[in-house]
Image (tube, rainbow, N blue to C red):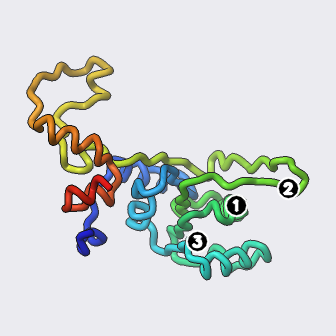
Amino acid sequence: MNQNIENIYLDRLIDPAIETALGAAGCVVIEGPKWCGKSTTAKRFAKTVVELAKPSTYRLYKLYADFGDDELLRGEKPLMFDEWQKIPDLWDYIRAEIDSKNGQRGGFILTGSARPIENNGKGNSNKRHSGTGRILKVVMRPMSLWESKDSTGEVSLADLFNGAVRASGRQKQTLRETAYLLCRGGWPETVLEQDTDKALL
């Protein structure tokens, strides 16, 4: 992989939605499949990042959560917890923190590829508070062709389905190029890979 890839950021359609959500709620949850770019995008909005995928960080913050230590939510805001589902209690701690600050907005960002499994030890699931009014969810998908710069964005599917515009034109990509884009997909890591053979692996 090109060593400069990690320094490249392609604007995502979801960026304005995240910014709006941070201005409207105390916490924003970014959900989506693995490798679609959640962490990379979220870090552009966060001032403090806690990466729970790192074993040592997870163990430390799990202790904070288990003992209700104030260090759990300490840090310049917005405070981001990557792979937050590894410590499900974070949800309730953050909700309570937002309430204690009279609904202060833009304090937290949660990212994760999976929802936490909740169990009270008796085989029954505990129902977590919905977070209504405090926590907003934003769903992220792999990159569109517009985001990957493989499309000009001249034609909007939403507008087409709404009957707002009539589009005509010709496909600029060859059949081979179109097949390549379909097989490559919209995963940021493959989009930025300059070696086309590696991008298909």
| Nearest to N terminus: mark 1 or mark 3 | 3
Q: Name the residue carrying label 1.
A: 88
Is 11 or 19 nearer to us in this picture?
A: 11
The vertical placement of 136 against 74, above or below, is above
Tell me the amino acid under the disc marked 2.
Answer: Asn
Which of the two discs, 2 and 1, labels the residue nearer the N terminus?
Answer: 1
Q: Which residue is mark 3?
A: 52
Quarter of the figure with residue 164: top left
Residue 101 in view of the camera: no
Question: Is 195 displayed left or right of 119 in the figure?
Answer: left
Q: Residue furthest right?
A: 122
User: Could you tell me residue 54's position as x and y percent?
Assistant: 56, 76
* Along the viewing direction, whichever of 189 and 120 lies nearer the viewer: 189
Residue at mark 3 to residue at mark 2: CA–CA distance: 22 Å
Q: Secondary structure at mark 3?
A: loop
How far apart in space, not on screen, are marks 1 and 3 (Cα)?
12 Å
Q: Residue at x 73, y 49 (%)?
A: 129
On residue 120, the disc is: 2
Look at 65% across and 64% down and name the residue there: 86
Count neighbours of disc 1 (C-alpha within 10 A) and say few if under 14, some if 14 to 19, many if 20 or more: some
Q: Quadrant of the C terminus?
A: bottom left
Q: Are marks 2 and 1 in contact (CB under 8 Å)?
A: no
Identify the image quadrant of the N terminus. bottom left
Q: Do the residues under discs 1 and 3 have CB atoms within 8 angstroms?
A: no
Side of 143 where 116 appears, left or right: right
Q: In the rendered image, is residue 77 in sight?
A: yes
Please, what is the three-letter code of the amino acid marked with disc 1?
Answer: Pro
Residue 103 position (above or below residue 151): below
Mark 1, secondary structure of its residue: loop
